[in-house]
Image (cartoon, rainbow, N blue to C red):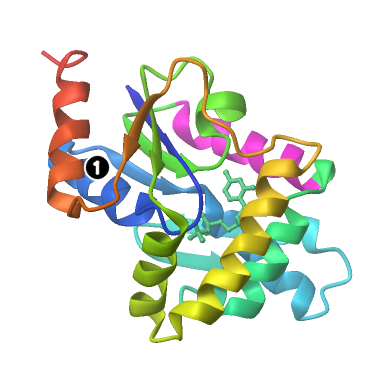
Amino acid sequence: MLIAIDGPAGAGKSTVARAVAQALGFTYLDSGAMYRCIALAELRGAPDPLVCAIGLDGDVVKLDGEDVSAQIRTPEVSERASEVASRPQVRAKLVELQRGLIAAGDYVAEGRDIGTVVAPDAELKVFLTASPQERARRRAEQIGADPAVVLREQTLRDERDSTREHSPLTAAADAVEVDTTGLDSDEVVARIVALAGRFLD
Ligand code: CDP
């Protein structure tokens, strides 16, 4: 079974997707980490970032064998990730990689285009949202930054992610939209686990 969780930055996708995977005994797939790896490779000056080897093992993210789990979370990488994600060749490579992974076993996959492009046949699709201010506040708290600065960067990234030509961020027609403003993550997780229950014995 596949649960697709898509939505904008700071909606709580990573926390929620991880917890849903744990609750159901599914594997968690962080597709954004892959875009971040390509961005990091490019920032490091790799001649062809598309040929780098990306490894995801639980929460550990590897780029050409090196643990880059922390390095891929900087604001500089976030910014470049959103930029590389607008390129069709990058998307084609990563979508193929993601499809290969989710082909076997039960997954909770999170990103921007899981329910629309990577796996339009996912059994359950969730689109997580929250107000821009709430999303910026959460992200700022997570990385210890100024919420006003995060909000400014987030607005630019949201704009780019939702207006790009290839696979713009948009909810699948059959996605369940969950607005997480004012909800804590336990409530959101319980809601998604309940929705998934319909597909499980
Ligand atoms: O953690 P956050 O939601 O801020 O970002 P992320 O999920 O780690 O993704 C980083 C960037 O990769 C996003 O700004 C998107 O531009 C891009 N991305 C994408 O285009 N498609 C995906 N399935 C996942 C991420």
Query: x, y (%) of residue 129?
Result: 40, 44
Query: x, y (%) of residue 56?
Result: 47, 56
How many labels sit on residues? Answer: 1
* Residue 15: quadrant of the picture: bottom left
Q: Name the residue: 20% across, 53% down.
A: 185
The residue identified by callout 1 is 21
Query: x, y (%) of residue 100?
Result: 55, 33
In this view of the protein, which residue sits in the foreground, 19 or 144? 144
For numbered disc 1, what is the local secondary structure? helix
Q: In this view, does 59 lie to the left or right of 149?
A: left
Outermost residue toward the right in this view: 47
* Residue 154: quadrant of the picture: bottom right
Q: Is residue 70 left or right of residue 17?
A: right
Q: What stretch is highlighted in magenta?
A: 90-103
Does the image show residue 64? no
Q: Three-letter amino acid code at disc 1?
A: Ala
Magenta segment main secondary structure: helix
Query: Where's the C terminus, which quadrant?
Result: top left
Q: Quadrant of ligand 1?
A: bottom right
Q: Is residue 140 above or below residue 122?
A: below
Query: Where's the N terminus, which quadrant?
Result: top left
- 151 inside magenta stretch: no
Q: In this view, does 59 lie above or below 22?
A: below
- Mark 1, other Cα within 10 Å: few <14 / some 14–19 / many ≥20: many
Query: x, y (%) of residue 145?
Result: 44, 86
Q: In this view, does 129 lie to the left or right of 24?
A: right
Q: In this view, does 84 lie above or below 187?
A: below
Does the image show residue 194? yes
- 95 inside magenta stretch: yes
Q: Name the residue: 54% across, 54% down.
A: 32
